[in-house]
Amino acid sequence: MRRAMELAAQAEADGDVPIGAVLVSGDLVVVAKNEKESRPDATAHAEILVLQMAARQLSAWRLADATVYVTKEPCVMCAGAMVASRVKRLVYGCPDPKGGAAGSVLDVVRHPALNHRIEVTPGVLRKETAAQLQAFFRKRR
């Protein structure tokens, strides 16, 4: 999670919301940061980018052994992409009470109607990840 927070700081330096993600699958480690503003692309969330990079490097869209570490609870788009990618585990920092899709607002990653459910570990470095986001938005307002 600390590596994801470093990536989030890089995203902020580039003018994006500070969210970072790290995907680990066996020996493969892939990292990304939010790039919505810098690309510009509404889908360029850190989670989407690590899923894409990992799939390319593994030459497989199924990431059944992967754990995704992300500084903030994923949105619906990212949670859905993780389910579609068959990610094994999600570890996130702070919850997103306005749009979280891993238990806060919705629970896409564990929804019983879907064909795959993800193991979730919430709240890792919760205070630190929340403080990073809060400081960013405080500066913007």
Image (cartoon, helix red, strand yellow):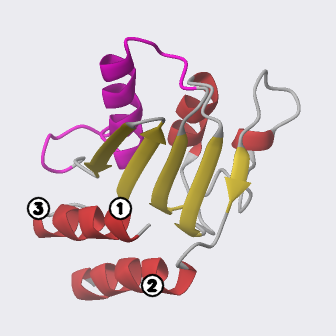
Circle 2/circle 1 CB separation < 8 Å: no
Identified at 76% across, 35% down, the residue is 117
Identified at 59% across, 41% down, the residue is 79
Q: Residues within 10 Å of mark 3 (few under 14, many from 20)?
A: some
Where does the image place residue 57, in percent across and percent down from the top left?
31, 21
Span highlighted in magenta in the image: 37-63
Q: Which residue is mark 2?
A: 128
User: How far separated are the C-alphas under marks 2 and 1?
Assistant: 12 Å
- Looking at this view, name the residue that lies furthest to the right: 112
Which amino acid is tagged 1? Answer: Ile
Q: Which residue is mark 1?
A: 19
Q: Is residue 99 visible?
A: no
The nearer-to-camera label among 2 and 1 is 2
Where does the image place residue 51, in percent across and percent down from the top left?
41, 32
- Which of marks 3 and 2 precedes in the sequence? 3
Q: Which residue is mark 3?
A: 14
Q: Is residue 64 above or below residue 118?
A: above
